[in-house]
Amino acid sequence: MIQKYRFGTPINTDAVVQDIPSAPMDKKDSEENQSILSLAEINAADHFTLTIKMQAQDAVYGLGEANRGINKRGYRYVSHCNDDPNHTEEKVSLYGAHNFILFAGSKFFGLFFDYPSDICFDIGYTTQDTLTVTADEANLDVYLITGADAYDIIHQFRQLIGKSYIPPLWAFGYIQSRWGYKNEEDIRRVAAGYRDNGIPLDSISMDIDYMDHYKDFTVDLERFPNLSALSAEMKEQGLHFIPIIDAGVKIESGYNAYEDGVKNNYFCKRADGTDFVAGVWPGKTHFPDMLDQNVRKWFGLQYKSLIDQGIEGFWNDMNEPAIFYSEEGLAAAFEKMEELEKFKDNPDLNAFWAMRDAFNISNLQKDYERFYHNVDGKKVRHDKVHNLYGFNMTRAAAEGFDEICPEKRMLLFSRSSYIGMHRYGGIWTGDNQSWWSHLLLNIKMMPSLNMCGFLYSGADLGGFGSHTTRDLLLRWLAFGIFTPLMRNHAALGTREQECYQFEGLEDFRNILKLRYRLLPYLYSEYVKAALNDTLLFAPLAFEYPEDAVAREVEDQLMLGEGLMLAPVYQQNTTGRHVYLPEPMLFVLFHTSEEYTVTPMPAGHHYIPCGLAEVPLFIRCGRILPLAPSCECTAQLDYTSFTVLGEEGKGLSYSMYTDDGYTKHPERDGKYLTITK
Ligand code: GLC
């Protein structure tokens, strides 16, 4: 059951799709349901504060794209879409704002705080036994979801926020990316690096280097003289391009998007009515007012110029929106430096730190307070709706695609997001690092993202910042072959990390081939999770709530109806400890073709897993169909499966299939019965 409590006069965020009348604030518990005041103390007089006492055994899940563990207890998190590439353990805000928590233990319920500005979840950080949710303004809708168990609560929440986005089948293929592919030759070299070495690949994503001076919807014609021809050439090899689009539109006379935007008042304005200026990649830009539906319509249609050149997928970036500097901030920084000039010959500690900090002017709250949106005819200051910007940029694109190519599913993923955006596209988890701890963070984040509707998601495999190592990339890929978005992406200036750059290519080939062998099953489980509002990745705690050990396992995940994953995420190891809450089949893939299957009893085990191997577990009574291996989704063969699972039990699996493009999976999908 879902109850909505309205406080003050909230801004409509479009996060939810069900129109639920607001319930009266009531202290009484009815039989089948609890009221919010029986669970929490609320103070909504001026600011908003909700407080819940936690028992020792209580866990708190959710928050989607957030730092730290699956169980969020013991830290604080602030929903504030943040362009911060250093995801170190103390950080409280990443790129998404996913205000859903699930309380599990002495009581079971979910809470969604539909509030588009900063909101803080202190989950036993200030006081160990207290969960406190605070927001500056008491204008929000709070949804209380009660149900039988974690799955039931998640299912109801997902129905509340609407169906998750389903990308085309090819989007489940392996994607190679790098900031720094600067011309057609670089792209051809990547394609050949994979194809010539027989390593599977479906797409290459194009970073800002393809644009003419980082101007959205333009192509640098010197370095990419004929994008249509290049994209046709790649398509012949079964490859797709996925260009990046950034939020800021470069200020440059003669540039269409800029001129159109100025003429039609499509850009966010300062209080005095002038267009707000933010410095990003191209220098000074304006931000399209994505919260205005007319602007969304205009911006969405801009993608047409690239779609007309054969593009079928995009990634939307810098849409928190990221601000390197504002005009005001830059002027103040130079003024400060003038003041400090007197210390230039011999700055002491304080003077030197002041100089160093003078240009610390990116993504400032002060700047987010300098510009305004037009929300349904009302002027709203940006900081009040900050977390909706990336959502609405991606919505603009998705709605544009519906008009430009209504018959096709397009690939779309975004960096910044709010709950509701999961209906329009996926997300990648931003600028991680080539650190083993970020492989573990990727593992832990997947179920939390799913809880909030974000099924099409994944991390930059191998790590974005820092130099990767061969073993880290192999281990990360061995987990990444299970994530819907499977993209290897790296930052400018880091070691090249395409699979063919490393010795022992066959190890990479085997792991990626296994992705394609698993792909029909993974796609089927994905679409089922999207259509049925369920999880693709679940914590063990949800599946085995009575098992005290399973409840605390955070480095193993349930995947779909039949699998459990236990990825290796430590360097210099030849295996790992695994806890089995029930007997399972342990499958160890030595290559994409060779594997051993070992039945294992419930309990603690140490499993071997060499650097080039992939472990997985099949649950009793379930089977895993493997397709023949291939090099891209266009070659997938759905006619002959190798089926792993218990012998002689007459087990079957109902596999969802479609043409990979159809817009109506529910209507047009078919189910193949696969038996063992
Ligand atoms: C941002 C993105 C990253 C991209 C870079 C250049 O940092 O998160 O993925 O490579 O911008 O466009």
Image (cartoon, grey):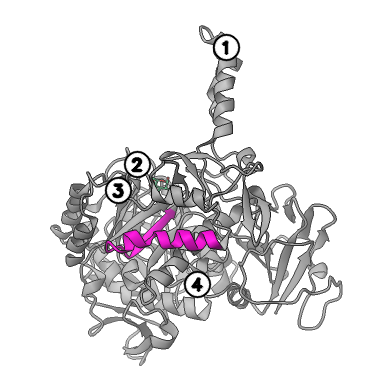
- Disc 4 residue type (three-letter): Ser
- Disc 1 residue type (three-letter): Asp
Q: Which residue is mark 1?
A: 348
The answer to whether residue 455 is above or below residue 361 is below
Q: What whole-number distance in Å separates the C-alpha atoms at marks 4 and 2?
A: 35 Å
Q: Earlier in the sequence, mark 4 or mark 1?
A: 4
**What's the magenta region?**
294-316
Q: Earlier in the sequence, mark 3 or mark 1?
A: 3
Give the numbered dot on residue 210: 3
Q: Quadrant of the C terminus?
A: bottom left
Q: What whole-number distance in Å separates the C-alpha atoms at marks 2 and 3?
A: 9 Å
* Label 2 with label 1: CB-CB less than 8 Å: no
Give the numbered dot on residue 164: 4
Residue 167: x percent and y percent?
A: 39, 70
Query: Relative to the observer, which residue lies in front, 35 or 298?
Result: 298
Residue at x-position 82% and y-position 81%: 30
Q: Residue furthest left?
A: 196
Image quadrant where residue 397 sits: bottom left
- Disc 2 residue type (three-letter): His
Query: Relative to the observer, which residue lies in front, 73 or 461?
Result: 461
Q: What whole-number distance in Å separates the C-alpha atoms at marks 3 and 4?
A: 30 Å
Q: Which residue is mark 2?
A: 213
Q: Secondary structure at mark 2?
A: loop
Q: Secondary structure at mark 4?
A: loop
Can you tell which of label 2 and label 3 is closer to the viewer?
2
Q: Residues within 10 Å of mark 2 (few under 14, many from 20)?
A: some
